[in-house]
Amino acid sequence: MTISQATQTIDQLSSEVLDRFKTGFAGPIFSINDTDYDSERQLWNKMIDKSPGLIARCTGVHDVIQAVNFAKHNGLVTSVRGAGHNVAGNAMNDGGLAIDLSHMRAVLVNPKSKTAIVQGGATWADIDRETQTFGLVCAGGVVSDTGVGGLTLGGGLSWIRRKVGMSIDNLIGADMVLADGSYVHASQSENTDLFWAVRGGGGNFGIVTSFEFQLHDLGPEVMFVACMYPREVGAKVMKWWVECTRTLPDEVTSDCIHWAVPVFPGFPEEMQGKPVTVLAAMYSGSAEEGQKVLQPFREVADPLLDLSNIYPYAGVQQMFDPFLAKGELYSYWKSLYMDDLSDSLQELIIDRANQSPAPQSLISIRNLQGAIGRVPSEATAFGERGARFLVSIDTMWVDAERNNDNIQWTRDFFKELHQHSNGQVYFNFNSDMSGSDDLAKDSFGPNYEKLIEVKTKFDPENFFRLNANIRPKG
Ligand SMILES: Cc1cc2nc3c(=O)[nH]c(=O)nc-3n(C[C@H](O)[C@H](O)[C@H](O)COP(=O)(O)OP(=O)(O)OC[C@H]3O[C@@H](n4cnc5c(N)ncnc54)[C@H](O)[C@@H]3O)c2cc1C
């Protein structure tokens, strides 16, 4: 065996080797015979059913270093888990070691400098709670139990993205454990190539034990639009929205989502399951100003349901949580950037939305640009800065017997969309991750070659490979 293979499984190790690791590791370690093993390996996507030989739940940097050294020296298949939301299920593996950060969730806000230091396994709910205490926000995800780790390393699209950019655009520094077990800091002044690469290059370069973010003033209340129009007027609503995004101020971040009224208590029974086109938007400024600016979003046609209101910012961040709860839905997602949405493309999207095989599915179209587009594409590893839209096909269903139908439907739809796009994808919304060089090329675009250089420098043996993998040279 050579160490670089990283293909060994835990059951190939002697009990002495295992005992040594367990003795030096502070957190709990779960193996298949433990009662909690199944709940520990459960990820957000119900479709993922991977069984690591060991799940090592880290308590801090010490444990992360121990776990990396143990895995490295024994050539183990290794995965890294933040909050476990990645749809491809990269946080777990079969037979190897899962390095679990999900209990490293501390968030330390400095209200004076408006910055926060956040441990690598925190969720956006952890950040929102701590930052809103000081009237501050961090550019993060829109479902509160999503992990800060995976989301940030892939880019990070929030409700304030057009005002302040992506999560990576607000990253000041990262503390990391590298593949050789060393502990380094990456920032604009230290390990600058590594800092460039982690801003969009995913989990390829090491384990981030803590992130430092720039925060912004916002809240406690914000204006949020959630206007559900009947699908019969979906084409009109989408066309209006596509045009309107040409002139919106950066304070407005908005999505057009083809969905169905959730079958959930609180929604009128006669409306549950009805196909809708939702305009969702948040104003990053005073709630009163937001009410005025966003009013037209509520008047495109007669809504079926209009849930728009002034809400606490932290409440907006949790609004979609109940419909996207961990372990509830089988999921298969794909996404593509679009420079524009022509009339014919809009027709295609509506048509496919009407044929969607599962009402839980979302076809989400996010408006980008604003602050995202003002960062030069070579300034960070993130590949695509120019597109106006990100179209994401988030297919979700409740019955395992429908797995094949739903996956095929998503792939067919993606293929059709692909012809109209520049081919670049957001790998954070992508179910097909492993073993494809194309995914890395399609994710990183013009930055791919430089990423290979940085990967070769910091992880020459491709120890961190269960991700949107960038293969090192040689
Ligand atoms: C319901 C839902 C809502 C979402 N909403 C958004 C959204 O609003 N905006 C958006 O941009 N994306 C969103 N996403 C996508 C999200 O960015 C990815 O799923 C991301 O991978 C989640 O991060 P995680 O830490 O929970 O993932 P995990 O599954 O825990 O980890 C995924 C991978 O990320 C890497 N990783 C995670 N943490 C670390 C770390 N600390 N150090 C090094 N590597 C690490 C590892 O390679 C790991 O395999 C959403 C996903 C879901 C399921």
Image: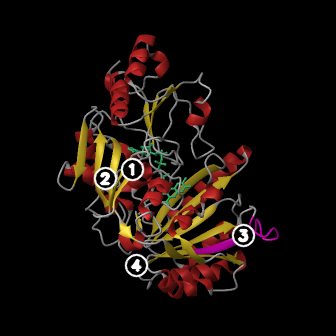
Q: Earlier in the sequence, mark 2 or mark 3?
A: 3
Location of mark 1 (residue): 440
Front label number (1 vs 3):
3
Q: Is residue 257 above or below residue 87?
A: below
- Residue 220 in percent (x, y) is at 48, 71
- Magenta span: predominant SS is loop
Q: Earlier in the sequence, mark 2 or mark 4?
A: 4
Q: Is residue 321 left or right of residue 166?
A: right
Give the residue type that dot 3 points to: Pro
Q: Is residue 53 above or below residue 153?
A: above
Helix, strand or loop at mark 2: helix
- Residue 267 in percent (x, y) is at 74, 68
Binning the other alpha carbons within 10 Å of mark 4 as few (below 14), some (14 to 19) or many (20 upward) gives: some
Disc number at residue 1? Answer: none
Location of mark 2 (residue): 448
* Residue at image location 53% in from the left, 84% down from the top: 291
Disc number at residue 250? Answer: 4
